[in-house]
Image: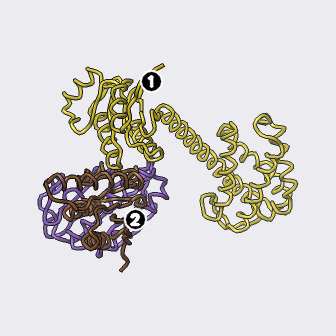
Amino acid sequence: MERIPILKMGDCLLVSIQVDMHDRLAMQLQDDLTTRIAETAARGVLIDISSLEMVDSFIGRMLGNIAAMSRVLDAQTVVVGMRPAVAITLVELGMSLPGVRTALNVEKGMELLATSMGAAAAGDGADGIAVD
Amino acid sequence: MVLLSTDQLPLTADEHIVIVRQSVRHRAVELGFSLVDQTKIVTAASELARNTIQHGGGGAALIEVVNDGVRRGLRLTFEDHGPGIADIALAMKDGYTTAGGLGLGLSGAKRLSNEFSITSTPGQGTRVVITRWKS
Amino acid sequence: MADTRSTQLADVIRSDEAAILADWLSLQIGGAASRRDLIGEPELKQQCADLLAALRNAAAESDRFDAGSRVWQPVRDVLAHVTESRARHGFSPSETATFVFSLKQPLFAVLQRRIADREALAREVWTMTALLDQLGLFTTEVHQKSRDSVIRRQQQEMLELSTPVVTLWNGILALPLIGTLDSARTQVVMESLLQRIVDSGASIAILDITGVPTVDTLVAQHLLKTVAAARLMGADCIISGIRPQIAQTIVHLGVDLNTVTTKATLADAFAIALRRAGLSVTKSPA
């Protein structure tokens, strides 16, 4: 079965969803991402949905799950490129994607990721845990 | 009401949801729906198609281009012969979750459509019909 | 009835096409309904020639002179094209229909010359007349639809013009809403704001409702939906220009603005936006 490719860039993982995903592919992405985060000890995940013409409640929940699971694995997630028509529809659908940080595009997404990764790291230090 | 075209698609497997989405998108584009309206009906179709498979045990989707004399529209029917819904009002409440979560799908599809109707008989099945008119 | 097995019309047109065209043309140019101000002779000649050729072809293939059937689609296409062009140039629906009807006379003249048998002639003339009647009516429908779409386009343009999106600063947009917000307008406004956010990469948008006289539940909900959609995309919204009366209405309606930043004036909202963007305005010594 085809899988959505996950790219590694520094300590971030990049995913660009370009296809109309069927549910199983979405679940596979969820699994693959969590596996890769753990494997690579990635600190950030950027999901580019600028090619998605539609996000329904299933995909919305998937994005929420990815954000939550990543956080548990100590990684920050940012979703970028949501199209206006998709945003309007999601609001009408009643989905607010809690816990999912968003940015307009990849560039802003990486900035946001860097900031939140920095904040998370600073948080570790403030707990009194020695950072080498 | 004049029927201008009909497509019937099976809903028994995961992949069928994508096919339904694409067919609905195709018809919506043909009808000249705005981008937002296209997205709304495709999303509603996705929700209802999934319900049919996950809660209805599988069924079929009917995609009809209709004309009520004044305007043209897209009418989608999702039908299954599954367990049915005992309490429709409850099922339509936002955020209502059975094992699996029907809530958002039904009420969401309703909000995304111009017309919405649901009939269900426990033990016999469910039928949901939504329509979006070209504005 | 329009149904007939005769195919003589096609032959008749073919054999006398030039004469029919000339006749038809002079009828229109010389007639009281001539609109030299709206259409030039060469263009008129082209329209006539195209229609006559399409008619000839369809008549040759058709055994049922029903202008709505598939065989006559090319004729309808030619007519639709001619009608839309004429509508744009200012022809009235009647004038365009008359363009079609005026073909009856030249065709009748040729049919009379070519067909000796009285019954056959009567049949052919009836068929031809009924056909051209249908086609004339068809142009009226096309004309109507074409006018409708012009009106719709103009309405859309008016809507867009009356809801400008302004770039206050790099990354900060403002949408000053003026006048009554009805459901349709608010939707257009919402969509164009969101598109501008994407196009400009602005992360902050200020919705200013100073110029909006009344806010009812529907309008309030639309505003909130716009804010929610912008946030989903990754941009923040601030609502400004909330007059005391509107503040009261909003509270009375029970609308929850807890998740949105609201300010009384656009200036205050701009100040907040600058701060959020990490910018500040400083006074430099003169």
Q: Which amino acid type is marked by label 1?
A: Ser
Quarter of the image containing the N terminus of chain C? bottom right
Q: Residue placed at 45% from the left, 32% from the top?
A: C168
Q: Residue placed at 17% from the left, 54% from the top?
A: B95
Q: Any mark on residue B94, and which? A: none
Residue A64 spot, x, y in % from top left: 24, 59
Seen as rendered, the residue at the extreme bottom is: A1
Does C253 sit left or right of C19 as displayed?
A: left
Q: Give the chain of mark 1.
A: C
Image-quadrant location for residue B77: bottom left
Vertical comparison of C24 with B128: above or below: above
Q: Give the chain of mark 2.
A: A
The foreground one among B41 and C205 is C205
The foreground one among C31 and B104 is B104
Residue A121 spot, x, y in % from top left: 24, 56
Which colour is chain A painted?
brown
| Chain letter, purple | B
Seen as rendered, the residue at the extreme front is: A132
Does C245 sit left or right of C140 as displayed?
A: left
User: Label 2: which residue?
Assistant: A16
Q: Describe the element under mark 1 as helix, strand or loop.
A: loop
Image-quadrant location for residue B83: bottom left
Task: Give the number of callouts.
Answer: 2
User: Label 1: which residue?
Assistant: C284
